[in-house]
């Protein structure tokens, strides 16, 4: 059975959607990491204690989300 042009277009649209969504997640990770590094170098001792607690929550969350999105994207690409 031949694929219709509509089916080919919908697959490419889904691929672009995955690429854009993955790029947004990775960009958010890079921005948060950059802000974290900037704040870490400009913080005094009292602020550093609070920032360290925030870093321990934010960085693993964003890293896990970015990893899941990238793993989902490449996992689907290898199967199809």
Image (cartoon, rainbow, N blue to C red):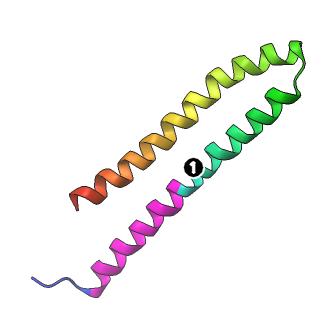
- The answer to whether residue 12 is above or below residue 66 is below
Give whichever of 15, 43 is nearer the camera.
43
- The answer to whether residue 14 is above or below residue 54 is below
From the image, give the main secondary structure of the stretch colored magenta: helix
Describe residue 28's horizontal placement relative to residue 40 as left or right: left
Describe residue 9's horizontal placement relative to residue 66 as left or right: left
Quick one: which residue is furthest to the front in this view? 41
- The answer to whether residue 63 is above or below residue 20 is above
Give whichever of 52, 2 is nearer the camera.
52
Q: What element carries label 1?
A: helix
The residue where tag 1 is placed is 26
Quick one: which residue is furthest to the left in this view? 1
Describe residue 67's horizontal placement relative to residue 10 as left or right: right
Give whichever of 33, 25 is nearer the camera.
33
Q: Which residue is drawn at 69% across and 40% down?
A: 32
- Quarter of the picture holding the N terminus: bottom left
Residue 36 appears in which quarter of the rendering?
top right
Give percent across and percent down for residue 49. 79, 13
Give percent across and percent down for residue 70. 43, 49
- Quarter of the picture holding the C terminus: bottom left
Q: Which residue is drawn at 42% across and 41% down?
A: 68
Describe residue 38's horizontal placement relative to residue 33 as left or right: right
Q: Tag count in the figure?
A: 1
Which residues make up the magenta segment? 5-22
Give percent across and percent down for residue 47. 86, 18
Q: Is residue 19 magenta?
A: yes
Give whichever of 35, 14 is nearer the camera.
35
Q: Which residue is drawn at 87% across and 24% down?
A: 43
- The answer to whether residue 63 is above or below residue 44 is below
């Amino acid at each position: 059975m031949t694929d219709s042009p509509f089916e080919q277009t919908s697959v490419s649209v889904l691929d672009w959607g995955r690429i854009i969504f993955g790029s947004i997640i990775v960009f958010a990770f890079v921005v948060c990491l950059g802000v974290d590094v900037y704040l870490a170098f400009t913080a005094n001792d009292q602020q550093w204690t609070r920032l360290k607690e925030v870093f321990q929550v934010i960085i693993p969350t964003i890293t896990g989300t970015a990893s899941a999105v990238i793993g989902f994207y490449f996992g689907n690409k290898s199967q199809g």
